[in-house]
């Protein structure tokens, strides 16, 4: 297969090209097949080092990256912030340069500040290293691998044989919840609009202010015919093909952005009843971990007819294997 | 060798059959031999994933499981509760389902609440997954691998060539200490009575109340002729073949269940002097970590003529390799 | 190659012989070459277990040891003190004996108390185990692998083809900073004086008291013509070939040993300007992590013409591979 890939770092989906999305989807599909075997390893990154630098803790995402790296036969290093030399006053760039000097090939970086992965990538390039930097979630900016695994999960459902970006052309996708603070939503907006889907954002006004849409559409071209904002749920759900729910951070209530979880669920929580407005074959996604009974009802979350949540986690390993593989293979 | 094994999960020894005990002992013996080689690895679980979900921290037991899994060539994932999404409000079953969806083959679970491994195993079966769940200690309920490594340590001493359950027939075994709160004691009672040994429990009345014996014997058959309770040490030690000491949690004193560690040691601590009541070839066990000078005198702990504590740790790796292997081999 | 190596433990450089230094340098050079390949692993320690027992946390050093062990194909176990049974009252020697009984081949130990690695090594020998103990930093005593990686970094610069101890004969080396509290400085003094270099220590009087020199020279022979103490910077820098800076612990100020970081930098901080007193080809080292603008100016740290800091980190993996390999190969 001839893949289009010339990207050293994965930092944002804002400038991802359709051929790149298809390269990821096609590579992930072949790794998904590997994962169904009894022996689930391939030697693609043997002898290479993947360092997980999670300045913000996350067991779920870190485990997914670690497993993806191990299944590619890479050696992994985990950086635990609580026991780190950060407490000794070292700067983040110096930490990254230390892992570079140790011989790291790919750095997977999560940080609570937007832009940290980009800053590290720029420093790595300035030093003329060949290290690849992978943004595993930076502040409220982007979380590219989550959006790509969402995309893969949907495309695999639409055509298990040949998942590809064009399958989403003309589909209606609702993104429901705390859009304003969500790096997942930001990355999904790029991938879904790139696919030609219609993206409908639904949230209370405090979590989806007018300037947000202007901010997004200012960066993108022709988004006005693909991106729609709603301050209530129903218009977004109407005839939707997919409903993506976002995790609600409980601290938003203390910031007076939300009245109560109960009230949020009554207005924006997804239930079997509410899905009746969507197309009959509608599916629901959530990046996890779910607050049961808040973003989504407990019954719906556990209903395999509608919920893709478990498939998303499985896709996560395959998509991260694909991305690490594509980043690593550029180093030959 | 034709082993009797048809068990997907290892949750409790209450219903373990003699043929299963012998399958574990026989398999552990062959792995003990592997561990004596310079290269101590076998490819039995290559490409499989063993996830250590230790909701209650334990370096010692976690390291033993991790090493056992690595020596079977499995990939391991460690779940650290302090950096986990549990702080984000996810339920334990959802955490387990996430690791299932990532492709975990065996989950090793420790939790401070009794019944958590069982609940996870039931959910895994309901979902028709083939994941095996391994109880690595749940509350005050059971700790099967500890009891099996104790059994293996004793049987290996009695017949290094062919360790088997029947070697314990008619032996007298004292279990001394905080029986009431001990998951180790509960699992040991099942394995030792299954072997045909006489089991003598000795503890202060606060740590071995009458209803405890009724609770145990209500579940089991014919235990009245094998299980004996004592509120003083000497009758339990009299002509004993093995003395199993239990770890004393220091918080028991704050619960007013114990006067002082010093007084406990005077009444129930095991010393060279006290062992004179036992058979001359008596051996002492302890699940570790030991409070030196409390459950057992420091001199006795370090005396290789009597102490099997170091052998227990070594057996732990071989027995856990055997159990992971037996669980994993059922998945072909 | 015929290497001189008969050492089971690496605890201190005080009694290291020139042939041993050369064995380390020669072996590290061959591993440095391995690290430049795409597949950076060798099977030297396959099936062996390296346990990192870091009672004092250190991500940087622990990662370096872990990577070195993995590149020798060893299995690694990490002991995290916060989640350890130390909180359960186990002694350090009992912890070490547990890891011995599990089958550990090499223990890498860091502890805030001087002498802990020695005590563990003595216990391992008393038990007639063949375990090797590696001091990864004990209190203010020694940090042998740091001094050896400094030595390797310097020798590799002086002769990339054949790094050897004698290259340092007659060189002038300044060690600047908190000598009194530095285990790095203590180890460096042994290796550098063994090489025949002139070692000039420079620090404020509070961090380099007179008795310190007497303490060191009392232990060593003929150090009076190789070791010089200065309470100001310039005499140490004059015509120096290498300047080793030491990390300043910020708590020294609260101990009233230092006026302020700013004042320290003005008196002992290394800058481009100050290096003009040295020989033109002078290089600067630092064990990391650096307090930018304190021990060394930020500009100088990032100037590849003078700074060897990044090379030190890279050398660290090669030197630790060499040391683990030499320790492990003695076990055949």
Image: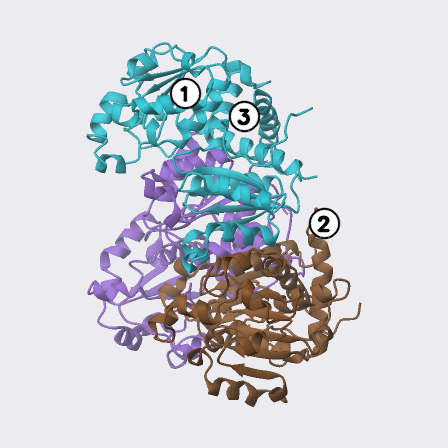
Chain colours: A cyan, B purple, C brown
Q: Position of residue B28 (x, y in %)?
A: 57, 55
Q: Position of residue A76 (x, y in %)?
A: 56, 47
- In 3D space, how far apart are the residues under numbered discs 2 and 1 (Cα atoms)? 46 Å
Outermost residue, right side: C1
Residue A217 bears which disc, if any? 1
Q: Nearer the viewer, residue C291 or B97?
A: C291
Q: Where is residue B81 in the image (x, y as percent from the top left)?
A: 38, 48
SS under mark 3: loop
Q: Is residue B48 above or below residue C125?
A: above
Q: Name the residue under label 2.
A: C37
Name the chain letter of the residue that bears numbered label 2. C
Q: Position of residue A180 (x, y in %)?
A: 33, 29
Placement of the N terminus of chain A among the 4 image quadrants? top right
Asked if labels 1 and 2 touch by Cβ distance under 8 angstroms, the answer is: no
SS under mark 2: loop
Label 2 and label 1 in one chain: no
Q: Mark 3 points at which residue?
A: A16
Name the chain letter of the residue that bears numbered label 1. A
């Amino acid at each position: 297969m001839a893949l289009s890939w010339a990207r050293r770092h994965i930092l944002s989906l804002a400038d991802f090209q359709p051929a790149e999305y298809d390269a990821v989807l096609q590579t992930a599909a072949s790794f998904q097949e590997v994962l169904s075997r009894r022996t689930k390893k391939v030697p693609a990154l043997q002898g290479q080092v993947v360092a997980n630098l999670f300045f913000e803790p996350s067991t779920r995402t870190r485990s997914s990256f670690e497993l993806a790296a191990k299944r590619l036969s890479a050696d992994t290093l985990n950086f635990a912030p609580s026991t780190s030399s950060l407490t000794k006053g070292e700067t983040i760039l110096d930490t990254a340069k230390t892992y570079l000097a140790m011989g790291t090939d790919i750095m997977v970086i999560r940080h609570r500040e937007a832009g940290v992965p980009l800053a590290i990538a720029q420093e790595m390039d300035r030093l003329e290293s060949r290290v690849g930097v992978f943004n595993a979630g930076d502040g409220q900016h982007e979380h590219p691998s989550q959006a790509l695994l969402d995309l893969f999960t949907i495309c695999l459902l639409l055509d298990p044989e040949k998942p590809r970006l064009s399958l989403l052309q003309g589909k209606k996708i609702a993104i429901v919840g705390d859009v304003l603070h969500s790096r997942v939503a930001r990355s999904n907006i790029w991938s879904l609009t790139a696919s030609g889907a219609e993206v409908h954002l639904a949230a209370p006004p405090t979590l989806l202010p007018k300037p947000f849409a202007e901010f997004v559409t200012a960066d993108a071209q022709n988004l006005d015919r693909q991106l729609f904002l709603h301050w209530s749920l129903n218009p977004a759900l109407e005839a939707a093909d997919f409903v993506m729910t976002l995790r609600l951070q409980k601290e938003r209530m203390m910031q007076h952005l939300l009245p109560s979880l109960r009230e949020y669920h009554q207005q924006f929580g997804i239930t079997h009843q509410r899905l009746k407005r969507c197309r009959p074959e509608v599916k629901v996604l959530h990046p996890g971990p779910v607050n049961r009974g808040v973003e989504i009802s407990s019954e719906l979350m556990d209903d395999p007819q509608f919920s893709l949540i478990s498939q998303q986690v499985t896709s996560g390993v395959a998509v991260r294997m694909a991305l690490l593989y594509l980043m690593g293979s550029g180093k030959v």
